Image (cartoon, rainbow, N blue to C red):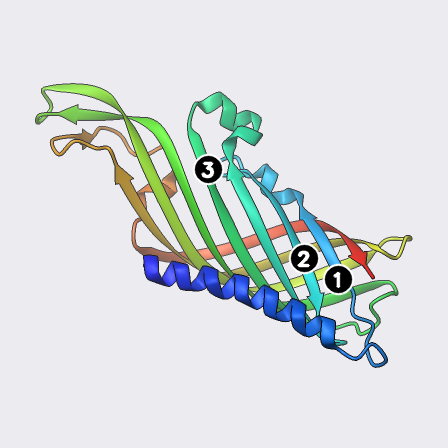
Amino acid sequence: MKVQARRTLVFLIVSAFAVSAASAQIDSARYQVPFAIKWNPTTLLDPANPAFAAGAEFRLNETMCLYTELSYISNGISIYGRSTGIRISGFKAALDYRYIFSRDYYDGERFFFGINVFYKSSTANKEVDFQRFGGLYSELIDVDIKRRIIGGHFLLGVEVFMPEERWRIEGYGGIGLRHKNIEKTNIPEDAEEVAPNIFFSDMMDGVTIPSILLGFRVGFVLK
């Protein structure tokens, strides 16, 4: 799984640079190719894994574009995260390939559908209640939990153009699958966890489950 995750991450990064180079070479007489930067405030609302996410959109031609996004995960940026005492950090890389229904980039709105792939890696540190030596006594132990998630979605969305033509508001949703790997460290061999984990995802190692993606972004077009 670790090898697969690394390959996916390399694919996302290489694809972004390749499309950027290709976009720069498109004949400007045939296409006016905008480059847009976008901010995703939806990720800040995640109570368990809040993140600051931003990305860039590259227009391939009149109907197709590529969007790549990087997220910095830290529960220190949310009030909920600071109040729990649980430390979470990590990153997420995502890549969307989109087909645009509307061909007029500068007027009104445009609808799109596409495919999204992503890789997410995070580490959490928290105190967990364990029984020691067959229940002789219980003890709170600091446990490191590493989560690695890879998945994809089918996307459907709309982008609304603001009166100032360079500003955009985008809403999107998707359904798909995600595969999770959970690794826990710093646990003594005799320790047995007393209660279920605080986060449901901590109990789901090596499983593939349905995934739903919803959110919105604010974008600015650089011509």
Mark 1 falls on what kind of element? strand
Say left or right for 121 vs 165: left
The count of marks equals: 3
**Residue labelled with disc 2:** 56
On the image, the x and y values in percent for residue 12 come to 52, 63
Which is nearer the N-term, disc 2 or disc 1? 1
Q: Is residue 19 left or right of residue 61?
A: left
Asked whether the beta carbons under mark 2 and mark 1 sit within 8 Å of each other, the answer is: yes
The residues bearing labels 1 and 3 have C-alpha atoms spaced at a distance of 30 Å
Question: Which residue carries the number 1 mark?
Answer: 35
* Sequence order check, earlier mark of 1 and 3: 1
Q: Residues within 10 Å of mark 3 (few under 14, many from 20)?
A: some
Determine the residue positioned at 56% across, 68% down.
15
Q: Which quarter of the image is occupied by the C terminus?
A: bottom right
Residue underneath mark 3: 89
Which residue type does callout 1 highlight?
Phe
Query: Could you tell me the amino acid type at mark 2?
Result: Ala
User: 131 or 12, which is in the foreground?
Assistant: 12
Which residue is at a point 57% across and 51% down the rendered structure image? 70
